[in-house]
Image (tube, rainbow, N blue to C red):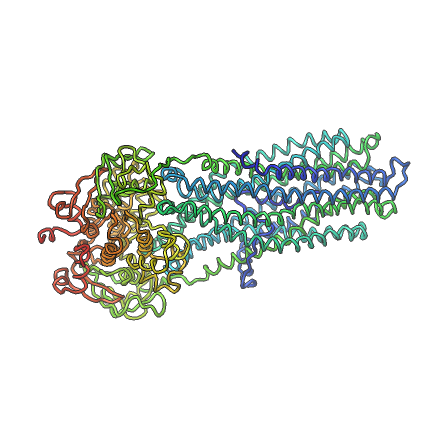
């Protein structure tokens, strides 16, 4: 799977790797040349103890060339690393987004919105960093570590053995530290969450705290959670405080051993002072390589975890199969539920054997307790979910037979949680009809009772809706999203409890204007308040996934106990007598 | 040879520590001097530790400066250019090196302790401040911002001060010590090695400008991209309902492509720093090897000195590479500290004042009260109202008519501008806030429950409440079903602000909490959220029950709840336009009648 993305940029990755090898080789060659400078140039060991200045300059020049070449390789490696890493990341990001856009709602629900967002942003960045670091870091560290070791063996077998002894010790120290800290990380995260949630709670609940005069209690509660967090954090920090000094100490031990053994070898004529110096430099290089490796391991575990989460998106396939129907129908605006049953993928049955028909131009009000399936029922019309039994027919055609875009082109929806996007108010409304002119937008807004407050804003229709509509009040957001639905001028208008934040006067005006603006549309109104539902042609009462009753206000009032109950809770017995 | 940047990253990348990169955007403080002084004060409190840490740093630096000269001596001895006992020299060298490691270790431990203590203090202080501040502060500041003060800024300050500062300190010491000893050994070679410093500074200067430019653009694009993802995924229903998938994908891909372009440029410029530094380091190495060789042939230095120089050059180039970075971090941390201090400097809610006079009667009067949140936008105007003891008064009116503000004023969350609010004739502006609030309970629109046990939540308004009292309150507020359903009864922990129970149940629990508090004055801000009819009925019953024989103020959003109130007050634009009983007001055919008719007559108005 990953391969598919890497393959496209494989040349870059290979070039990056090749240049890295060049850079590290140059790093590895230098101490050798230096030892030659010392041994032959300065001490003249091979020239009978006479120093050779020319040789020093020659070798020096050679080294400079190698260094510059190494630097060039390193820079080019850097270029190609990022070209491959960023492009791969970009391709993944785009593919993920495209994939998400084909998701069905059960799929979105399964992932969860928050999780999808982190996957798209944080996780892909992690994967991208992981690729860059892998290409650059892995080659570099392994080559540096093992190359240094190899070079030491070549210099002198004894030196090689010294580092070979130290190597596992260093690994062990690192492993122990990582393991000890690793077990603390989960705890750390939990405690951090606790502290954060207390802060969150108290910041939002400050009125209750003050009203109950519990400031001191809250301070204590926070202090306790904070103490625990600090304790764990301290433990982690101390574990890591041990790692570097111990590893360094081990390296110093190796240096001392090399000096002492070097002395023996030099006396025996098996080594030269220059080679000892080179060996010490190699030891340092090896250590640096290993320290980098620790960092890499952390990033790799993180990168792999992120990759798994990204794959979760990429591996899933669209669940809804598109139909053939292009939306041309003889009837316009009829909806029929034929023995519809629906259960969520987690097994929760929400609707059972629903039979309901709405004729073109009719208004249907849906009422019932929260959680009784009203929103689910209307979600089946634009095929946000597929029914588990029966069929939903729009204009006499099963919704499964439509092309999804054609089906949704027939329907305009305003949702309970009005979703607005960070763009201007005008752009948000024009989602309903991208070709609409300013006049049309304004009149749609007027029908939605939104024109007056939009016009009063300093920038009018050009006011930018801040992130998820934070700058507008709940009622204003609802009205903008209704304007969007009105502008679409679709055959079917669905208001899913989309006027809940409006006061009753505004709501009444809105429905009146709506009847004028979209007179021929079939309207489905999910409502909590009798006042909103009362004027509908039909009112359907949903109870535990069944239609308990369906009829006009008067009919229901006369015959349906559930409706009477709602009516009484909202209006009261007194009025009952007046009726 | 080494790549100091990567190595530094290794130690910084440990979770729990803050990760710093070379080219992060640096923030600047406005009042540098004053802020520094205050940060300093926190560390003065821990002066023992600070002094200890600094002495350890000094000692460690001395060791690290001294040890390579022993290494040089050992090499000379091996090469035979110097007489002496190799074994002793090596043992001495090892000891010094080990001491150095020891110092590193101590420094690490002490700085960890120090930073955590400072974090703890600062965070507790800031939290206490937030709780003590007037409600206005949290009402007018973004909560996300406040949270980031508590976490990011504070963590930043402490890690910087406890980690960057010692590294700055030891860096400066190392540079001074190393430079001195290098000059002492061979000033010519020393000067030649310093050439690399110039190269480093030059490279940093050239690259950092570019990187900063690109990374600013990158941050911006990244923000835009994340915003798109967030908006589109959470608004997916609307996206699908309006068939906007293709258009959005197109937009997204465009942003993603330009982000990638900028990202590649940023990364190339910032990433090239590694190889360039490596290259500069190697140049230094060559300079030392070649010129060192040259000098040693001329008898100026011994080969041991070359070996020492290799170590020294590395030792002193590392802090130089880091200085710019540490400097940036310090600036950012100080700017963060300044933000924290601004919060700490806010004035606490005044807790002084007399006690509320004990009385069985509780009569609340508002006399010509005026109030505005922002000067020039009056919210309450000339508001006069008497709530007789034990009676129930309802406030009704459109959104924005000022109903909720009355709660803020009576609880003294906000102070009135003119007029008087009295309880039994005693002006509440003279009563201490604590004492005033102890006599009242509120049930708010947005139900706040704490992630604690159910018992603690119930006892929130009355710590002394016995279990029997709680059980009674829960029964009265129709919560016994819920209590039975929870497996641990009163010991059940409500998770994440009570998210494991439904909205309606939360409202019931809030009413129960008010029951337990058993206040003399009760304020109910009726919730507007949609709950099912059965729960709604339960909530209304519970509300009636808790208000019985208590001085109560109800802020009503539905008229059905308040029909039996002793007094109904209709508000509009901060003023009382009508008041009377339900029947009286209906008979008046005024504003209340209009409201009532819209609510019940449905579409027809």
**B481 sits to left or right of A40:** left
Q: Quadrant of the C terminus of chain B?
A: bottom left
Q: Is residue B383 above or below residue B191?
A: below
- Say whether residue B180 is left or right of residue A430: right
Question: Would you place residue B461 above or below residue B385 in this image?
Answer: above
Image quadrant in which the N terminus of chain B is located = top right
Residue A82 appears in which quarter of the rendering?
top right
Quadrant hosting residue B525? bottom left
Closest to the observer, B381 or B359: B381
Q: Please tell me which residue is depicted at 42% across the width and 42% down the height of the picture.
A: A101
State the image quarter where residue A386 is shown: top left
- In the rendered image, residue A274, in percent from the top left (x then y), is placed at 80, 38
- A193 left or right of B309 in image: left
Residue B472 placement (x, y as % from top left): 22, 45
Give the residue at x 69% y 38%.
A24
Percent from the top left, x then y, of residue A181?
A: 53, 38
Q: Position of residue A217 (x, y in %)?
A: 37, 51
Up-down: is B482 above or below B372? above
């Amino acid at each position: 799977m990953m391969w598919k993305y890497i393959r496209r940029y494989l040349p870059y990755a290979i070039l990056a790797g090749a240049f890295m090898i060049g850079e590290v080789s140059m790093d590895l060659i230098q101490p050798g040349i230096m030892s030659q400078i010392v041994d032959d140039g300065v001490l003249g060991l091979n020239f009978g103890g006479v120093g050779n200045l020319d040789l020093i300059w020659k070798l020096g020049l050679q080294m400079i060339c190698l260094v510059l070449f190494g630097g060039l390789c390193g820079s080019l490696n850097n270029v190609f690393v990022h070209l491959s890493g960023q492009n791969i990341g970009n391709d993944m990001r785009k593919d993920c987004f495209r994939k998400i856009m084909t998701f069905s709602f059960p799929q979105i629900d399964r992932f969860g919105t928050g999780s999808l967002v982190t996957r798209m942003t944080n996780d892909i960045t992690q994967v991208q960093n992981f690729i860059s670091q892998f290409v650059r870091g892995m080659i570099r560290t392994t080559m540096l570590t093992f190359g240094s070791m190899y070079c030491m063996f070549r210099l002198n077998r004894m030196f090689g053995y010294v580092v070979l002894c130290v190597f596992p010790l260093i690994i062990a120290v690192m492993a122990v530290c990582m393991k000890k800290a690793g077990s603390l990380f989960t705890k750390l995260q939990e405690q951090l969450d606790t502290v954060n949630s207390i802060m969150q709670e108290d910041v939002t609940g400050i009125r209750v705290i003050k009203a109950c005069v519990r400031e001191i209690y809250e301070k204590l509660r926070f202090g306790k959670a904070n103490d625990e967090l600090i304790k764990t954090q301290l433990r982690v920090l101390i574990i890591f405080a041990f790692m570097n000094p111990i590893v360094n100490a081990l390296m110093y031990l190796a240096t001392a051993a090399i000096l002492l053994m070097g002395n023996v070898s030099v006396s025996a004529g098996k080594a030269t002072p220059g080679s000892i110096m080179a060996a010490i430099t190699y030891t340092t290089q090896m250590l640096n390589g290993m320290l980098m490796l620790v960092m890499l391991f952390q990033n790799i575990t993180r990168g792999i975890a992120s990759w798994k989460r990204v794959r979760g998106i990429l591996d899933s396939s669209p669940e809804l199969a598109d139909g053939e129907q292009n939306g041309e129908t003889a009837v316009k605006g009829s909806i029929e539920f034929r023995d519809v049953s629906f259960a969520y993928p987690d097994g929760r049955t929400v609707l059972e054997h629903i039979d309901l028909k709405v004729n073109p131009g009719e208004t249907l009000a849906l009422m019932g307790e929260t959680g009784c399936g009203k929103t689910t029922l209307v979600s089946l019309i634009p095929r946000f979910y597929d029914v588990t039994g029966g069929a939903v027919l729009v204009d006499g055609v099963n919704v499964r037979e439509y092309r999804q875009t054609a089906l949704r082109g027939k329907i305009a929806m305003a949702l309970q949680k009005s979703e607005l996007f960070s763009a201007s108010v005008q752009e948000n409304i024009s989602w309903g009809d991208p070709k609409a002119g300013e006049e049309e937008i304004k009149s749609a807004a007027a029908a939605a009772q939104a024109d007056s407050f939009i016009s009063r804003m300093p920038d009018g229709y050009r006011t930018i809706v801040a992130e998820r509509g934070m700058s507008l009040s709940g009622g204003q957001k609802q009205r903008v999203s209704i304007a969007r639905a009105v502008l679409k001028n679709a055959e079917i208008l669905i208001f899913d409890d989309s006027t809940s934040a409006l006061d009753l006067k505004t709501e009444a005006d809105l429905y009146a204007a709506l009847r004028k603006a979209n007179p021929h549309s079939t309207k489905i109104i999910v409502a909590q308040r009798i006042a909103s539902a009362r004027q509908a042609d039909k009112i359907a009462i949903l109870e535990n996934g069944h239609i308990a009753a369906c009829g006009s206000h008067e009919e229901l009032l006369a015959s349906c106990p559930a409706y009477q109950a709602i009516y009484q809770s909202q209006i009261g017995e007194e009025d009952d007598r007046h009726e | 040879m080494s790549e100091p940047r990567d190595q530094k990253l290794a130690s910084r990348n440990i979770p729990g520590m803050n990760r710093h990169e070379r080219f992060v955007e640096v923030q600047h403080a406005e009042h540098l001097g004053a802020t520094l002084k205050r940060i300093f004060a926190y560390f003065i409190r821990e002066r023992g530790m600070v002094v200890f840490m600094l002495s350890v740093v000094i000692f460690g630096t001395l060791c690290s400066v001294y040890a390579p000269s022993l290494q040089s001596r050992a090499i000379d001895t091996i090469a035979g250019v110097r007489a002496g006992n190799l074994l002793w020299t090596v043992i001495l060298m090892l000891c010094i090196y080990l001491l150095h490691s020891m110092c590193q270790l101590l420094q690490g431990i002490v700085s960890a302790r120090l930073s955590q203590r400072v974090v703890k203090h600062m965070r507790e202080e800031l939290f206490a401040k937030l709780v003590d501040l007037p409600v206005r502060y949290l009402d007018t500041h973004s909560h996300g911002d406040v949270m980031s003060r508590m976490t990011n800024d504070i963590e930043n300050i402490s890690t910087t001060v406890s980690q960057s500062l010692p590294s700055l300190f030891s860096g400066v010491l190392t540079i001074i010590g190393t430079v001195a000893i290098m000059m002492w050994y061979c000033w010519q070679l020393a000067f030649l090695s310093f050439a690399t410093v110039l190269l480093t500074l030059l490279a940093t200067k050239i690259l950092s400008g570019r990187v900063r430019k690109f990374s600013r653009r990158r941050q911006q694009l990244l923000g835009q991209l994340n915003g798109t993802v967030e908006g589109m995924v959470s608004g997916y229903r609307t996206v699908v309902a309006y068939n906007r998938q293709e258009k959005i994908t197109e937009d997204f891909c465009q942003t993603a492509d330009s982000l990638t372009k900028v990202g590649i440029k940023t990364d190339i410029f910032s990433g090239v720093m590694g190889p360039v530094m490596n290259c500069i380091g190697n140049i230094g190495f060559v300079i030392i090897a070649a010129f060192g060789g040259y000098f040693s042939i001329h008898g100026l230095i011994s080969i041991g000195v070359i070996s020492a120089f290799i170590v020294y050059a590395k030792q002193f180039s590392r802090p130089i590479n880091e200085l710019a970075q540490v400097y940036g971090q310090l600036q950012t941390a100080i700017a963060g500290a300044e933000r924290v201090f601004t919060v700490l400097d806010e004035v606490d809610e005044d807790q002084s004042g007399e006690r509320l006079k004990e009385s069985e009667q509780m009569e609340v009067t508002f006399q010509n009260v005026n109030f505005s949140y922002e000067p020039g936008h009056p919210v309450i105007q000339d508001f006069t109202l008497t709530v007789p003891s034990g009676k129930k008064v309802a406030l009704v009116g459109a959104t924005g008519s000022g109903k909720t503000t009355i709660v803020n004023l009576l609880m003294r969350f906000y102070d009135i501008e003119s007029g008087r609010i009295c309880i039994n004739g005693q002006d509440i502006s003279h009563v201490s806030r604590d004492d005033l609030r102890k006599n009242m309970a509120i049930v708010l629109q947005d139900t706040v429950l704490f992630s604690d046990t159910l018992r603690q939540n119930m006892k929130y308004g009355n710590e002394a409440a016995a279990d029997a009292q709680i059980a009674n309150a829960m029964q009265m507020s129709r919560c016994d079903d819920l209590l039975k359903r929870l497996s641990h009864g009163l010991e059940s922990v409500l998770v994440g602000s009570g998210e494991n129970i439904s909205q309606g149940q939360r409202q019931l629990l809030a009413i129960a909490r008010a029951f337990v508090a058993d206040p003399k004055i009760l304020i109910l801000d009726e919730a507007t959220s949609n709950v099912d009819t059965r729960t709604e009925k339960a909530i209304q019953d519970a509300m009636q029950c808790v208000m019985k024989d208590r001085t109560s103020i109800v802020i009503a959003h539905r008229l059905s709840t308040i029909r039996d109130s002793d007094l109904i007050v209709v508000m509009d634009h901060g003023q009382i336009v009508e008041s009377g009983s339900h029947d009286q007001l209906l008979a008046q055919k005024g504003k209340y009648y209009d409201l009532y008719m819209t609510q019940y007559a449905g579409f027809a108005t």
